[in-house]
Amino acid sequence: MSDKTKKNNSCKREIEIEIPASEVMQEFGRVVTQYSSRAKIRGFRPGKAPKDMVKRMYYPEIQETLLNNLIPQALNKELSDKKINPVGSPIISDIHFKEDEPLRFKATVEIWPEIILPEYKGVKVQKKRTTVTEKEIKESLEELRIKSAQYVPAEERGVVDGDYVVAEIKGKNTKTKRFLPTEKVVILSGHQDNEEALNKKILGLHPGESAQFTIAYKKEHENKKLAGQEIEYELKVESIKEKKLPEINNDFAKDLGDYKNLGDLKTKLKEQLGASKKITQRREMAEEIIGKISAQMSLELPESVIEQEFKALMSRHLSSLPRQNVSKEALESMREDIRNRAIQNIKNHLILSKIAEEEKFNVSEEEITEELKTIAKTHNVPLARVIESVNQEGQKDELKDNLLIRKTVDFLIKSAIIG
């Protein structure tokens, strides 16, 4: 077997492989025999039909089986001999097959780039602030106050923004005159996800009062039944509940949990905010260190890996957005930003993995067990259930990789020069 390897770029190899005619015809004969043994041809008992007839009748299937047998085997041998570890599945092209001639084909494979690290110890980074201000404590208290809000009946006035409104809503298609099913809904008045016409018309309505409004839905609307339709709605308010915020005092603190008074709650909030700031400080320092290391390197990445990371990030981002149409311009800008983030994520992971290799870091079974205990405690579930879940979902290697990356980040921060 002969081959020729072409280097398209640092992440792509094109291999031309030729399998001698003698090997091809030997395998061809074996496949024909295989088909002959189980071919069902009228007038012949199974396995007794002439091979020439079997070959003629099943030639496309025989050829496909031959190629499926020979190409992966030959390619795997070449990749192994050349110590090429492909990323993803190779792309096979330019297959040339004729009887009594060598089998030739091309395989394009992507590989990880060679990583040559710059000096990564003693990177200079700015010290981040971790002190907690009184303003931040007040903001946290206000967040707790909003979360503790109660909704109480407001029957003596009309709807205002922020009310929860129970209403009956009827819809009619203005073109077909067909009615939509009557629904009882709960509406948060003034919410950004509501249709603008609804938010305007519901204001001021008292229980028992109704309002009519029409919405022309765009063709791109996420609800296929409404997309491109114009619907005339009648909305009748049944009840209104308004938000009541508690006073921030000792009783408020006691109601939140095991706090003696408001001062005790503030102390706990200060501790929590401080711990959160330290986590943020660590993350920002790590990003700054890795960013400075990355800036000194030129890494060409496999396109298939970038695309995979991009799709994962894009899907996660879109699912977190409010339910509203995104303009083409905004979507394009979003795609570009997320693609750049995907590239940086991959670069960061490669850099950290290479540093871990250089420093000969590893993760022990004891460290994995301790991490599983932490996960169990954080989520308040039995350790046995966490272990079972990790094993069933095949996440142990991922967990081990995350611990290795965390250990490497700790090493970089400890060795950094903080100014």
Image (spheres, rainbow, N blue to C red):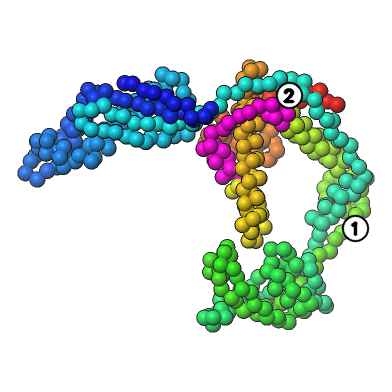
Q: Give the dominant element type of the magenta stretch: helix, strand or loop.
A: helix
Q: In which quarter of the image is residue 61?
A: top left
Inspect the image, locate mark 2, and give the three-letter code of the amino acid beneath it: Leu
| Tag shown at residue 412 | 2
Q: Give the image quarter of residue 278.
A: top right
- Please tell me whether mark 2 or mark 1 is closer to you in this view: 2
Circle 2: element type: helix
**Left or right of residue 105, residue 47 in this image:** left
Is 97 placed left or right of 170 in the picture?
left
Q: Which residue is drawn at 70% across and 30% down?
A: 295
Which quadrant is the N terminus positioned in?
Answer: top left
Q: Could you say which is closer to the camera, residue 146 or residue 225?
A: 225
In this rendering, position of residue 34 left or right of residue 240: left
Task: Locate residue 146, reporting x and y percent.
Answer: 82, 57
55 or 11, nearer to the observer: 11
Q: Earlier in the sequence, mark 2 or mark 1?
A: 1
Residue in the picture at 85% in, 48% down: 140
Please report the bounds of the magenta region as a residue range.
290-313
Task: Place residue 55 in its image quadrant.
Answer: top left
In the rendered structure, does residue 215 fall within the stretch colored magenta? Answer: no
Residue 203 seen by the camera: yes
Q: Mark 1 points at which residue?
A: 247
Residue 279 visible, this angle: no
Q: Label 1 is placed on what type of residue?
A: Glu
